[in-house]
Image: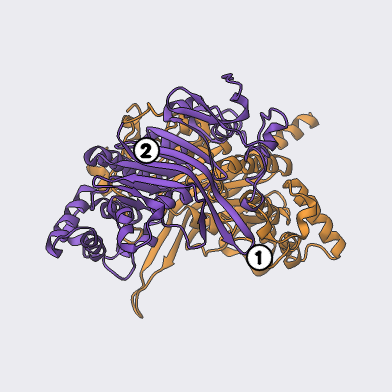
Amino acid sequence: MLLATYMKMEVITKMADLVKVENLSVSYKIGGGLFSQNYLKAVNNVSLSIKRGSFFGLVGESGSGKTTLGRALLNAVPISSGTARYDDGDVSYELSTLDKAELADYRKRAQLIFQDPYAALSPRMTVRDIIAEPIEVMKLCSSREEIDNRVRTIASRCRLNLEHLRRFPHAFSGGQRQRISIARALVSDPRLVIADEAVAALDVSIQADVLNLLKTLQQDMGLTFMFISHDLSVVAHICDHVAVMYLGRLVESAPTKELFKAPKHPYTKALFSAIPSLNPDDQGTAQRLEGEIPSPTNQPSGCKFHTRCPHTIDICKKEEPILQNTDRQHEVACHRWKELFNI
Amino acid sequence: MDKLLEVKNLTLKFKTDEGLITAVEDVNFSLNRGEVMGLVGESGSGKSVTAKSLMNLNAANAIYNPESTITFNSTKQEVDVLSLKRPADLKVVRGGSVSMIFQEPMASFAPSINIGKQMIEQLQLHNDISKKRAREISIEMLDRVGISDPSQRINQYAFELSGGMRQRAMIAMALSTKPSLLIADEPTTALDVTIQAQVLDLMKDLVKDFNMSIIFITHDLGVVAQTADRVSVMYLGRIIEEGSVREVINSPKHPYTKGMIAALPRLDNLGSPLRPIPGDIPSPLERPPGCVFNTRCEELVGDKCSLNTPSFTNFGETRRVACHLYEDGSDN
């Protein structure tokens, strides 16, 4: 009986949300004068939840707000409205109202991996100092010996040669540099890691290696990843759940297999068909999107996608569709998803 | 066949503070009129340097091997590209019969001069036409590449256009002189997928209309599969495999090509794990002796891989592979 209860609890904690975002918006102030103020809504009314220990993918084109959403979850940009709740079992924070002490603690628990491993590492610091810096800033260790130990542990986890810790970043290739960035992000033992285009700058043969490393680290250290990418094939291979953004809105969100097997939003379908196929004979079947993503400062009315959607009808221009659950955690924001499902 | 371009024994080193760096080594290929060739490789493979050599556009510290020749058969005469010195002579391969489009269109347009002025300038440089006529041609070209309202757009500056528009304008500008060869260096890498698809479609249409040849440089095998007839795979400055796109992608022979295709995340095999190529691309300062790929190869056939540079083994008319695996004529 006790065991059963325990197991049940285990299941619950595993399924619990690490991050729960509700109606989150982020606006940037742009221009405007003394009496008027203009805002750019980069993220608009987004709700999503990220399960503990999952690999959550966020895809979209440039200007879709995926990076801004990631930064909001790191408390690196202020949240304009809505809530974002972080709960890892030990602590629970509301990200829009963190005080100074809470923020300092949250920084240890949520970390970021950047896109460009050439720009992210200081050329004047040794690899050891680069990885140790977060521990020193956060005052996680008291003695130098302790810091060294921690650096060595995480470095070997990220498959870095310990002999290389004394070298400077210029001596390393792109793949090695990205592993150094990963070690630096993970050295404070975070629970949530936001990887913003973490493999986009790498060559294909290296990219696969870094993706496999991220997956291994996630499983070994029990991490939760938010993986932001424009590359759908990469996301399909590494993520458990994928959310698609367009012009600051979430248009579709589903478990990876479900999404790639049966995309429901016309934008998601168009994104899939735009990926150049590796099969040279596979030509011309793709459905092409007309035009480009509208400017976020001058957003269309109704459904934000209606200017490019091949299935637009009157209601799409007037009313904005809300994200609704269809089945099996598959959510979509489209007025016509039911009738278009079989197209 | 009508040969447009022939590159022979192209070897190119850069003189730097750290010594001579070999960027391209013993590259040979030819291109027919109307053919689209993909040049695929990762960073440091020498694909961009090779392309720039075709326009004699490499930096001043580039040293060509004396045996290197690049012959370009323009409609009027045969040009030995590497011997061109005077700017007036170079015009033929720089924007005249050969044009190039780059990855970052923002960096390719002058920011403080409007698009029209730049298009007209280069048209007048290569053709003896009036400013008015040059403007008409430019507007026609902008219209042809799908820019709406071209007579208005031509007065705009590069920063006023979106990424996709800018790349279209770049293509219009490159094609307005009606070149017989277009070099496209990662033309869609900086674009979003939906825009990339539009630009690739446009380029395919233009090839047919203008009957020109294209050298398409990219690291993306999917893009090559969708655009090129033939593909050459480069690694650390050498061509290691060459053939029709269909053959090379469907049945790669060189261990590097095989590895690169296996490492690619594909949507048609979601369940299978990604297989990276072990190790890192060596620094060009530490080029491995023997086969350039031997430090990462999983199909080594003994000492000769690290001692001798493999020569090409031919498979049929168009297919060749530089690997010791096939030197005894076997086809494994």
**Picture coordinates of residue B308, whole percent (x, y):** 66, 36
**Most foreground residue, B302 or A262:** B302
Residue A265 position by quadrant: top left
Q: Is residue A247 in sight in this rendering? A: no
- Subunit that carries the residue with mark 1: A
Picture disc at residue A7: none
Q: Residues within 10 Å of mark 2 (few under 14, many from 20)?
A: many
**Which residue occupies 28% across, 48% down?**
A291
Give whichever of B219, A245 is nearer the camera. B219
User: According to the image, label 1 marks what residue?
Assistant: A123
Query: How many labels were placed on the picture?
Result: 2
Write down which chain is painted purple.
B
| Dot label at residue B31 | 2
Q: Colour of chain A?
A: orange
As drawn, the residue found furthest toward the front would be: B66
Q: Secondary structure at mark 1?
A: loop
B143 over A76 or under it: above or below:
above
Q: What amino acid is at disc 2?
A: Leu
Q: Residue A142's spot in the image, x, y percent? A: 84, 65
